[in-house]
Image (cartoon, rainbow, N blue to C red):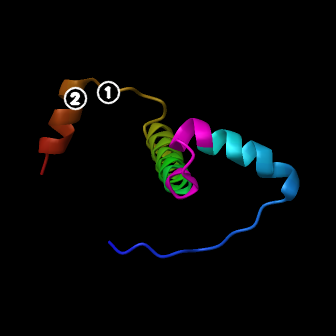
Amino acid sequence: MAARTVGFAIDESMRADLDEVVERYADGNRSEFLRAAVRRYKADLLRERLVSVREEARAERGGRIYTHDEVLELIARP
């Protein structure tokens, strides 16, 4: 994977905060911090989607909770 430089701007009042979190979470490497932040927020998006799917499934089941064996039985049905 070839790295490509991208630019972004922050307000000067955030500079100290940026430096602090970059030092804490990426040993002072801003590029690595941005990569870590993107991975983190991407995971958050997936987690939100999975929660949404789970809530939809619960609503479809009327709140019923199936046992592990019941789930396997449902999957095995043609």
Q: Give how far across and how far down residue 31 sits, in percent.
A: 53, 58
The disc at residue 75 is: none
Classify residue 13 as left or right of residue 47: right
Q: Residue at x 12, y 43 (%)?
A: 76
Classify residue 33 as left or right of residue 11: left
Q: Give how far across and how far down residue 59 sits, in percent.
A: 51, 40
Q: Give how far across and how far down residue 63 sits, in percent.
A: 48, 30
The disc at residue 70 is: 2
C-alpha separation, residue under disc 1 versus residue under disc 2: 6 Å
Comparing 76 with 9, the one in front is 9
Question: Magenta span has 17?
Answer: no
Q: Give how far across and how far down residue 23 sits, in percent.
A: 60, 40
User: What span is colored magenta in the figure?
Assistant: 23-33
Q: Which residue is identified by label 1?
A: 66
Element type at marker 2? Answer: helix
Element type at marker 1? Answer: loop
Amino acid tagged 1: Tyr
Query: Which quarter of the picture shows residue 75?
Result: top left
Amino acid tagged 2: Glu
Comparing 71 with 24, the one in front is 24
Classify residue 13 as left or right of residue 36: right
Q: Quadrant of the N terminus?
A: bottom left
